[in-house]
Image: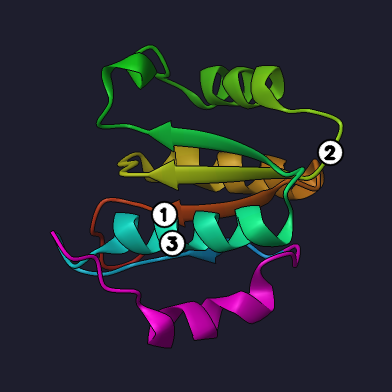
Amino acid sequence: MVLIKREKYLSRVRPYFNKQLIKVITGQRRVGKSYLLKQIVDELANLTPTGNFIYIDKEKFEFDEIKSYIHLMEYIKKQSLDKTNYVLSMRYRRLKVMKKLCAACFLMAITIFTAPVAIHRYF
């Protein structure tokens, strides 16, 4: 399978990589939001080799126990290190939880990228 680099979209996101802004990648189902997020991670890993990447993919069974904002923050705190932390959230459906997650990550100076399940209006 040939993977196509999404240079057009990456070039639009790059200026915000390490800014304290919440980066939300939106789009219809099956258009490549998660794949674009993975490309962003690859670039960030090259730019910040000591960065700590915290992945949350709600389609994976290992995250089934995360049912609330409190569980989500506990998971992130356990995974956080004393260096640059990036939270990458994919396929999250609960809008209220995501709003609180984004606010808390902002206060903890954690850079967050999220690609929620296709929704028309996020915030």
Label 2: few (<14), some (14–19) or many (≥20) C-alpha neighbours in 10 Å: few
On screen, residue 54 above or below 45: above
> Which residue appears farthest toward the front when viewing the image?
2
* Colour scheme shown: rainbow
**Can you identify the residue that label 3 sits on?**
39
Provide the secondary structure element on which disc 2 rests: loop
Name the residue rendered at 38%, 11% in the picture: 65
**Can you identify the residue that label 2 sits on?**
83
Magenta highlight on residue 58: no
Instruction: Give coordinates of residue 86: x percent, y percent.
Output: 65, 46
Q: Earlier in the sequence, mark 2 or mark 1?
A: 1
> Which residue appears farthest toward the right when viewing the image?
82
Which residue is at the front of the view, 53 or 43?
Answer: 43
Amino acid type at circle 3 is Gln
Q: Is residue 13 left or right of residue 85?
A: left
* Segment tinted magenta in the rendering: 1-20
**Can you identify the residue that label 1 sits on?**
38
Label 1: few (<14), some (14–19) or many (≥20) C-alpha neighbours in 10 Å: few
Instruction: Give coordinates of residue 120: x percent, y percent.
Output: 26, 67
Instruction: Give coordinates of residue 64: x percent, y percent.
Output: 32, 16
On screen, residue 56 above or below 32: above
Amino acid type at circle 1 is Lys
Name the residue rendered at 25%, 60% in the picture: 119
Residue at mark 1 to residue at mark 3: CA–CA distance: 4 Å
Magenta highlight on residue 10: yes
Amino acid type at circle 2 is Lys
Label 3: few (<14), some (14–19) or many (≥20) C-alpha neighbours in 10 Å: some
Q: Which mark is residue 92?
A: none
Instruction: Tell me whether the residue at label 1 lies in contact with that at label 3, contact meaning CB atoms closer than 8 angstroms.
Output: yes
Residue 123 seen anywhere in this rendered image of the structure: no
